Structure formats: C-alpha cells, structure tokens
Amino acid sequence: MSYVQIGLQIVLMFFVLVTLHEWGHFYFAKRAGILVREFAIGFGPKLVSFRRNETKYTLRLLPIGGFVRMAGEDPEIVEVTKGQTIGLTIENGQVTHIYLDKLDQRSDIILGEVAEIDMERELFVELAAEGDKIRYPIHPQAMLVARGQETQIAPWDRQFNSKPVRKRAMAIFAGPLMNFILAFVLFLTFMFLNGKPVNVTIGEIVPGSPAEAAELQAGDVIVRVNGETIGIERDRIMTLISENAGQPMTWIIERDQEQLQKVVTPRTEDSQGALVGVTLAFGTQGISLGEALPGAWDNMVMATEQILTGFKMLLFGQFTFDDLGGPVRIVEVSGEYAAAGIAPMVFWSALLSLYLGIFNLLPIPALDGSRLVFLGIEAIRRKPVDPNRESLVHFIGFAMLMLLMIAVTYNDIVRLIKG
C-alpha cells in the first residue's frame, strides 16, 4: 500500500471520528431548538467556511478535534449598549439588520442612539433621534453587523441555558454517544471482515528454524500437537512449545486435505525461551449476524475495560511521561494499522472512536464530562452555575489540555528522531 493511500485512510478516519462526534452535539442541540452558530472540524484559523441556514460550517487548520458553538453556552461576544449609535434595516415592519460600525458608509438605514434594547426576551429596540423615541420590533433572526461580520441574535428561547437540564445534557452527551455507536458498528464490521476462527494455521517459517527442518509450510493447519487437539487454541500451542524445549514433539498438520505427521524439536533461545520458528495465524470462515453481534459487543467490552485500566494507571502514577502518546504517535500507529490491511484499520478505528467517547466523558474542564458535571450541579441546586465562572473553568482546562498536547507531541517527535 502506498504512503498516499495510508495517508488518505488516516485523514478519512479522523474526519469521520470527529465529524460524527460533533454531529451528535449538533443534531440534539437543533432538536432542542438551540441556535447552533458554528459547526467546526479542527481548531485555529479557518481554511474553508460556508453558511447554511443559521449555522456556519468551518474546516480549521489544526486537525485535533472540533466543536459545536451553541448560542448562550458561552457569554455572547457582540453587545449593544444604551447610548450607542446604531443603524437599522427594516423589512416588513421588523428590524432585520443592526449595524454597529461604518454607519457613514451605509445607505438606506435608520440611524439613532439606543434608548432601550432587548434582543433576548421582548425583541425590540428604541431609538432616540431629534428628541423623539421610536420603538421597532426585532425579527427573531435579525443580524448584528460589525467589523464585516454578521452574527445572528439569539432570543432567550434559542439559547442553550434556556432549555431544561435534560435537553442540555442530551446535547452534550450526544457527542460521546455517537462515538460509542460508531465503535460498535466498526467492531461489527471487523467481525464480518475478519470472520470466525476455525483453526490455527502456520503463517511464516523462519529460515534455519526447527519448523523448516521439520518441513512445515506456510498455510499448514495444525490439527494436534503431542496428541492434543488444538482447534483454535493458539495460546495452547505456545504453552506446549515452552514445556517441551529440546524435546521432540509430534505435530499432526493438514495440507491439501491430507493429514501429515511431523516431528518438531523446539530450540531454546537465551532471551526468548523455546521457539520453533513459526508465526501462528487463524484460519477463518464467514460469520452470521447472530454470531457477529455478540462478538462485536465482547470486543467493545474488552476494549472499554482496557481503556479504563489505562486511565486508572495514569491516575495513580503507574505511567511515565514517555509512555504517553500524542497526535504524532496516534498517526504513527494508525499508519501501521492501515498498512496491515482494511480489517486491522477498521479495528483500530473502533478503538479510537471508543477511546474518544470515553475520554470526552472524563470530568476534565473543557471536555463534555465537565459540562455534564456542571449540569448535574445545577440539577441538584436547582440553580445554574454562574456562566462566567463556568467559562473560566473550561478555558483554563482547555489551555492545560493544549499544553499537555504540545508536550506529548514534542516527546513523540523526539522519540521519532531518536528512533
């Protein structure tokens, strides 16, 4: 497989994992009636941007995640204050555009000083001009225009914090949920691609090894070893080899639908123990949906346990910094799986999707888990946490995560240079 193909597979994998995660947030936010300002893949400067309906879709420079920006989730950036001179565009009796700058360059607008304005609940603006005050109703989708940017207003009923806790929690949890669903689908796909193991076969023969001396061949099916039926017990073969170092072993193998008897004497290696010089693989056959579903679930449960064990070891300091890997290491390992074939790549993608879902549910500031913690506190107190304080917590957490990512990325690069 060429480097271009491997690279395209890795890019596609990350794009699907991140996009589906953010789509989960997006879909359930829209279902709850929340105004979604931006659906972004990546962070940093914009590479591609377009608007459809109320949402701006952007592809950003740094492919290390994504975000869905919901109205009211963080304090709004654009504000209009009393005494400020603004310009209005009126259509069908309602304000459709509110201009905050370059007023002398705009034509066909109504100019005035803001006497009163409410863009959240009552939706009106009152202008003072030449001693009179005139009130204008504001359209629920009116645009604020400043510095060449248009920002749609967010009435209170379109803001994140106006919705019940359960709907907000679902909009946050939906991102990891999509990753869990994708992981299961990928594990299921892997089961169909990989098939069901039915026997143990010989993969490769090491030149000059006891296996070559015994005239074993790649593709031979191992039926019995020392009278013991093997079936799909690959680990049992390894145990028998270790127990019979230097002792002749009787192997019954099947080749071209004929059973043959071979005598193999394991050789002891100083650092590796007893070896016969073969790699072992599974012979497989097609699998039904009824067999694939529990197999996919078992793989997902096993992977979840391993991921949680890793987090536990990290929490209790059983990892060194060199054990951690960042984006560079993930890309490196992804390349190895992509080169190994479509089935290993699908399995690796399932693991990453599962990891992304679990990691995002950790109660770390800036992650989905932390936002769910704040919603849980609100549900218990029956009173929301101060949005400014919550935003500060998430900002600090995001900054710390970025510093950690920079550190592990530097470590990955040094490790690559050193080989």
Image (cartoon, rainbow, N blue to C red):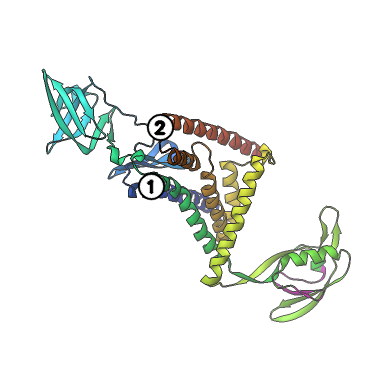
Residue topped by disc 2: 387
Q: Is residue 27 left or right of residue 320?
A: left
Residue 226 sits inside the magenta stretch: yes
Earlier sequence position, callout 2 versus callout 1: 1
Question: Measured from the top left, where is residue 68 in percent x and y?
Answer: 40, 42
Given residues 382 and 182, the one toward you in this image is 382
Give the quadrant of the N terminus.
Answer: bottom right
Task: Judge the density around disc 1: few (<14), some (14-19), many (≥20) Cα neighbours within 10 Å.
Answer: some
Range of residues picked out in magenta: 213-229
Residue topped by disc 1: 167
Q: Is residue 277 left or right of residue 331?
A: right
- Residue 126 sits in quarter: top left
Q: CA distance from mark 2 to mark 1?
A: 18 Å
Outermost residue, front side: 381
Which residue does the image show at 12% across and 39% down from the upper left?
92
Question: Measured from the top left, where is residue 332 in percent x and y?
Answer: 59, 46
Residue 141 sits inside the magenta stretch: no
Q: Amino acid at mark 1?
A: Lys
SS assignment at label 1: helix
